[in-house]
Amino acid sequence: MQNSIFVNMANYRFFIDYILHYCSAKTRHGVHSPFVYRLVDEVIYNVEKKPYTDKIEDQRSRLLNDPREITVTDLGAGSTLNNKRKKPIKTIAKNALKTKRVAQLLARLANHFSPEHIIELGTCLGITTAYLAEACPKAQVITVEGCPETAKVAISSLNQIGIGNVKVKTGNFDQVFPDILAAQRQVDFVFIDGNHRKEATLNYFRSCLPKIHDHSVLIFDDIYWSEGMKEAWQTIKDHPQVSLTIDLFFIGLVFFKRDQAKEHFKIRY
């Protein structure tokens, strides 16, 4: 009973946050920054279908119908949905995969910024990873999954789709991420989707700072997931090295353009 009340309260807060965001957010017509206007107009609102979409969504469908059970190792903040150790793959696909809309947006953003290296924290079953890799076929994609059995399913998914520019690493983000960053000359494009705790999120953010450059892009998932995540997002916005942020509610984009005055945007998406 207490768990049910907690979930309902969390959903209520999330709904209120969404309504508040929607009422205060702007479309491209309310944006006065040329950089943000072009990004919204040409990338965020551009829903043109890409040639790789069908094969990735076919794989999503297979996962949504896969009855096999795997043992889930949850190293992050956990889930309020079916939080048991043994879970069918189809349940994980239903509850944990990024929606087609968000995954395709991430792909468009990656394609637009043309990074040499992409880092993803939170592989899940590999669908968003596939979108990032297909959108940037010349980039090296490194993705990290905390759960070994989930990572195996993701690797199988990527192989079935025919993707070859991804390295899947398994382990605790706190241990694996520093090693990945140490091997990078600079940070180009990072999508952080896992361990939705305030301090963990801020640690990942701070770890990237020594290697950011003017064209670096950090993307944080679920910035309204909890009070802690909202606080983390505000701290990131306030950081002196951050010049511009775009709040799309479901994800937050962070930029480090030294020639730009500090600005924050809420965009209706």
Image (cartoon, grey):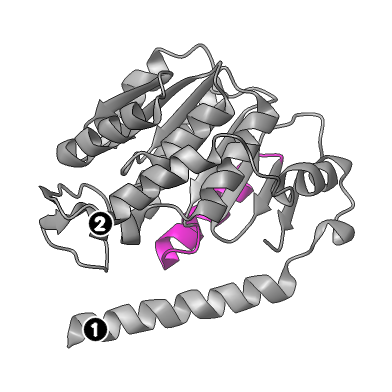
Q: Nearer the viewer, mark 1 or mark 2?
A: 2
Task: Give the magenta-colored segment's residue range.
Answer: 223-243
Q: Earlier in the sequence, mark 1 or mark 2?
A: 1
- Which element type, helix, strand or loop, lies under badge 1? helix
Can you tell which mark lies on residue 244?
none
Q: Amino acid at mark 1?
A: Ser
Whether residue 50 appears in this view of the structure is yes
Q: Position of residue 138 (x, y in %)?
A: 56, 15
Q: Please name the residue shown 58% across and 50% down the image.
A: 252
Q: Position of residue 45 (x, y in %)?
A: 74, 52
Disc 1: CA contacts within 10 A as few (<14), some (14-19) or many (>=20): few
Measure how far apart labels 1 and 2 are at the Cα level: 23 Å
* Mark count: 2
Q: Position of residue 209 (x, y in %)?
A: 53, 28
Q: Quadrant location of residue 254?
A: top right
Q: Please name the residue shown 53% across and 22% down the image.
A: 187
- In the rendered view, does 196 fall on the left or right side of 208? left
**Quarter of the figure with the N terminus:** bottom left
Q: Is residue 178 magenta?
A: no
- In the rendered view, does 38 fall on the left or right side of 12? right
Can you tell which mark lies on residue 90?
2
Can you tell which mark lies on residue 4?
1
Q: Is residue 226 magenta?
A: yes
Q: Please name the residue shown 80% across and 61% down the image.
A: 27
Q: Please name the residue shown 51% across and 42% down the image.
A: 54
* As drawn, 162 above or below 25: above
